[in-house]
Image (cartoon, rainbow, N blue to C red):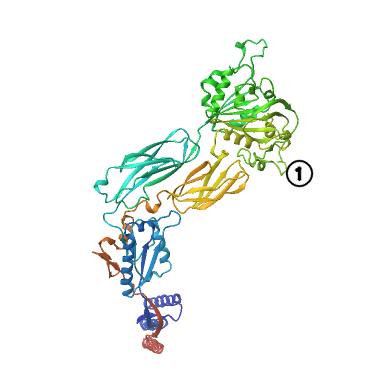
Amino acid sequence: MSFIFDPLIPLALLAFLGVLLFALLGFASWRGLPGWWLRGLAGIVVLAALANPALQDEDRDPLEDIVMLVVDETASQRLSDRESQTAEAVEALSEDITSRGMELRQIAVPDGVGDAGSELMTQLSEALSEEPNSRIAGAIMVTDGQLHDVERTPELQFPLHALLTGQKEDWDRRLIVKNAPAFAILDEEITLTLRVEDQGAVPSDMEGNALLSIAIDGAEPDVYPVPVGEDLEFPVTLTHGGRNVLQFSVELAEGELTDRNNSALVQINGVRDRLRVLLVSGEPHAGERTWRNLLKSDAAVDLVHFTILRPPEKQDGVPVSELSLIAFPTRELFLEKVDEFDLIIFDRYKRRGILPALYFDSIQQYVENGGAVLIAAGPDFASADSIFRSSLSNIIPAEPTARVIEEGFKPLLSDLGERHPVTEGLEQYATGPETEDGSPAWGRWMRQIEVVETSGNTVMTGIEDKPLLTLDRVGEGRVALMASDHAWLWNRGFEGGGPQLELLRRLGHWMMKEPDLQEEALTALVEGQTVTLLRRTLSEAVGDVTVTSPDGEDRVLTLEEVSPGRFAASFEGTQQGLYRAVQDDVETVFGLGPAAPREFVETVASGDKVSDVVAATRGSILNLSNGIPSLRMVGEGRNAAGRNWIGLTPRDAYVTTNITITPLVSPWLFLALAGLLSVAAWLREGRR
């Protein structure tokens, strides 16, 4: 039962009347009216009647206190004997809590989505949002203490306790990659920073060195002894473009908790530095500037361009000393420094006696050793002075017939060209829809050199389906022959133009061995846990692909054609680590997720991450290896932990089922008292 006021009029109006009453009483007192105090008492009685003092009686049903029990069921809780520790603690606490007449809310916390780790605080916040805060007597977490969302801790008005699983003698060794770039320049040394680190109670016989294995792209690993607890500088030089997968691992030591954090995957994309291109133009012509503009527009290309303006046979009587021309440094370019170029382009070049046979032999050797030569053929290629009439004929993939066709034609993709990465999909770069005959909507070229394919692959054809663009691999290098010098017409927009820029860009990148333009390749696209394997080939059909998981298990996938020359298959990766996919004679390696999941980065049980949160609620951090603590009820604001016991705060919450309000004084009594005081004031004033 409690005393309350239940005003008969709005509280604001009651306050106004009170202020008015006291203002009038002050005025009456100042004027010296004899009965002012009696009238004041009458007014106060009236105000008290309007305030309606009453006794309130409530019928209450008590509510049970609620205890939140957060159970960590993440992967690290399955190490050693932590599962049995957790089960025993949960069973004992559940029985103790329910025996005290309290409600138990058990929250099981699995591994976070992806690699989120242990999200105990997130789960606790969501559970608390569904319960009245006035009924929460406390929260208990059974965990190894390795939380990954402490910053999401909700506002707690009750004790929080952490019961740690694990043993005092637990220890673990882990490998950390402290510094690894996402990109690196080919053939330039980069440095990775690694560290082998021990955690927990490390046995004395395990201190010192560890054996570190290093494997690149799944090859046979190299093994090195390395010190523990020190940063290691590891130099790496990438030799091929695209994705390079480096796997580092440390051998499993006796007694450590797990080997899941003993390895690390690093995926680095290899990119070329500035590409050096040598462009040799046999004579000035309309298409020369097209080549120059294309190469100069790429900031990653260093272009060296020579145009033969004064061939040896030109005799006009002008003394050499009066010519402002640079001599063609043939020996320096084609003998001494030829290997420094990534690509050599002969644009309408013919033999003029400038390059002796020895220099052509040097170019042939340059290609066979991994270089690239692109020949843009003009009418001179069909003449007796053609560079085909040199030792370069051993590497050029088509032979001229000496016929030059001077008529308009539209370049078309061959059946092979629709699958080749240099030319596939070029139709989408056309300036308009397909024409009535089904050919791409791009302009014509006006000249073609007739050639006969002798090797390689013809990806574009011209007049009478004769080879227009032929590609070939020679030794370690590559050669391309374009049997026309009119590609520049597309650049000028003749008859709508065409994809000249895209074609030449792809052609140049293919010759410089960009991984994205390999004819025979197997690549993996990873999105979350979904892996899509893409097989690119010039064949019309391919066999199945075999995928080897990190645990050595093989699975066979059937590739389905998704576009000409492209076959794909997808699967869900169930493990994290290094995968290998093999199809015929091509293969690829890729990493799915981190080699060491977040849950296994730190495995030794510790309360450091939750110590501040627990201390703020007067809770405690106890080790289950010392026994399961007992429960005690403590008052609010009191210390809620002690030696092998944890405290809960009773909330005494209830729900009101009925309310009875009884006026403290009868309204008639207020009326009579106010009347008597008013009469007394009148009599007092009358006597005067």
Q: Nearer the viewer, residue 40 or 627?
A: 627
**Label 1 belongs to which residue?**
436
Residue 27 position (above or below residue 509) = below
26 is higher (above) or lower (below) than 505: below
Secondary structure type for disc 1: loop
Left or right relative to 587: residue 421: right
- Quadrant in the picture for residue 189: top left
Q: How many marks?
A: 1
- Report crowding for label 1: few under 14, some 14 to 19, many 20 or more residues within 10 A (C-alpha): few
Q: Residue at x 31, y 74 (%)?
A: 99
Tag 1: amino acid? Glu
Coordinates of residue 196 in the picture (x, y in percent): 33, 44
Q: Picture coordinates of residue 560 (x, y %)?
A: 59, 49
- Is residue 530 toward the left or the right of residue 431 in the image? left
Q: Which image quadrant is residue 73 in? A: bottom left
Could one spot residue 205 in this view of the protein?
yes
**Residue at horizontal 39 percent and vertical 64 percent from the top:** 108
**Where residue 601 sits: x, y (%)?**
37, 51
Quarter of image, res 631: bottom left
For the question of whether residue 329 can be seen, the reply is: no
Q: Position of residue 349 (x, y in %)?
A: 64, 23
Q: Is residue 328 above or below residue 525?
A: above
Is the N terminus in the top left, top right, bottom left or bottom right quadrant?
bottom left
In the picture, which quadrant includes the C terminus?
bottom left
